[in-house]
Image (cartoon, grey):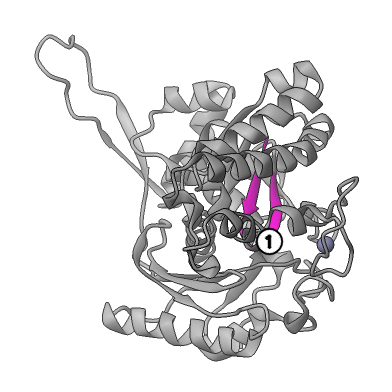
Amino acid sequence: MPYASPMSTLYDRPAPRDRTREDIYQLIRGSQNLTRSTLVELTGLSSSTVGHAVAKLLADGRIAESQARAKGPGSGSGRPATILNAVSTGSPTGAIDFGHSHIRVALGDDMGNVVDEVTVRLNVDRMSGEGIELACEHLEQLRSAHGTGQLSSVVAGIPGPVDVVTGLVCSPTILSSWVGLAPARELAKRLGVPVLAENDALLGAYGELHRGAGRHHQDFVYVKASHGVGAGLVIKGQTYKGATGLAGEIGHTALAGRSELCRCGNRGCLEAVISMQSIREQIAHTHPHLDPSQISPATLDDPITARILNEAGRTLGKVLADLCNLLNPTALIIGGELGASGPALIDGVRASVNRFAQPATAAAIEVMPAALGRRAELVGALQLAGNLARP
Ligand SMILES: [Zn+2]
């Protein structure tokens, strides 16, 4: 059965000339109606370099050009600009986002657009086999409901580290029931199509890079902050995975003076202090009428919840400030359920970055919630599946 090794994806660095063309293609695909002159502005490349890349993409049938509509009366004369758009091949694609306690499944097209999606609750951490079966069932149901043919490619997000060489979930302390599993191989076996498995935070970063708050940033850190905490790094417009795919595991950074027991076996990890479970327990102390497992911070509007979220943001921001000193990004994009919880958490992150990062570094950084909200990982997975489905 086809198995797309994580080593053989578009993450591999193409030859410089091809890379420029791919960068330009991604810009065209991620936007609509770009002109050659806009591409020159966006990339900083010469007009001849952009022109050569566009000509090759047109010749390959990957993009098409058309005349922009004439503007309204009084908008001036002159020929309307030629606009460029990516060409769809019509191939259906699939995306799966395994959270710690949910699975999101989407059917999409090769442009990365969502056609339909469904979310199911499951303790994914402890039920890897059931999770894989359930995800495949739902993807098949979506495909059947929409009468689409065979999927061209599927990308799955895993809430733990995936080794880029072996494709195996590899940290015995983070996602124990998945260890030794090759999720891509297992999914490909059941679905009969090529599958790529990636760390979920990396896919969230990819989603925000192409469709969300990262579109205007070349260097940023995306943080998925939900039941676990992980980061996806984008450096010079490319996702960065590290030597073996484990970059960004910030959730297990040890915090000074903290003793909370973490699921990894250590004490005082960032994730143990600010995970959704921890936040819910803190809120439940002051909201005894609420079922702790059902607490959704985004729906609560009271000063105590805001204080708890702000404090969590400050704790997260302290770890991110160190990362900012190291990487000098222009944005911190906070995703996951905590990222979607409202301004109190984001304000807390901002306060710590201002306090602990070097002043010039902090001044260059925007702190914001993920534009795609809790769907960043799913959207990123579908965007990547669309890329894999295309020539
Ligand atoms: Zn830990």
Q: Residue at x 82, y 30 (%)?
A: 325
Q: Residue at x 90, y 47 (%)?
A: 257
Return the residue found at the far left: 73
- In the image, 220: left or right of 361? left
Q: Residue at x 67, y 44 (%)?
A: 312
Location of residue 366 (image quadrant): top right
Q: Is residue 218 visible?
A: no
Indicate the amino acid at tag 1: Gly
Q: Residue at x 73, y 29 (%)?
A: 353
Give yes or no for residue 231 being in the magenta stretch.
yes
With respect to residue 107, does 15 lie above or below? above
Q: Which residues are drawn in magenta?
A: 220-233
- In this view, the residue in front, 10 or 164, is 164
- In this view, the residue in front, 41 or 286, is 286
Give the residue number, with chain letter if any, for mark 1.
Answer: 228
Quadrant containing ligand 1: bottom right
- In this view, the residue in front, 188 or 51, is 188
**Crowdedness near tag 1: few (<14), some (14–19) or many (≥20) residues, C-alpha within 10 Å:** many
Relative image position of residue 127 (x, y in whole percent): 64, 86
- In the image, 363: left or right of 192? right
Relative image position of residue 387 (x, y in whole percent): 52, 58
Give yes or no for residue 192 being in the magenta stretch.
no
Relative image position of residue 182 (x, y in whole percent): 72, 81
Q: How many marks?
A: 1
Please, what is the dominant secondary structure of the magenta stretch?
A: strand
Image quarter of the N terminus: bottom right
Relative image position of residue 346 (x, y in whole percent): 58, 36
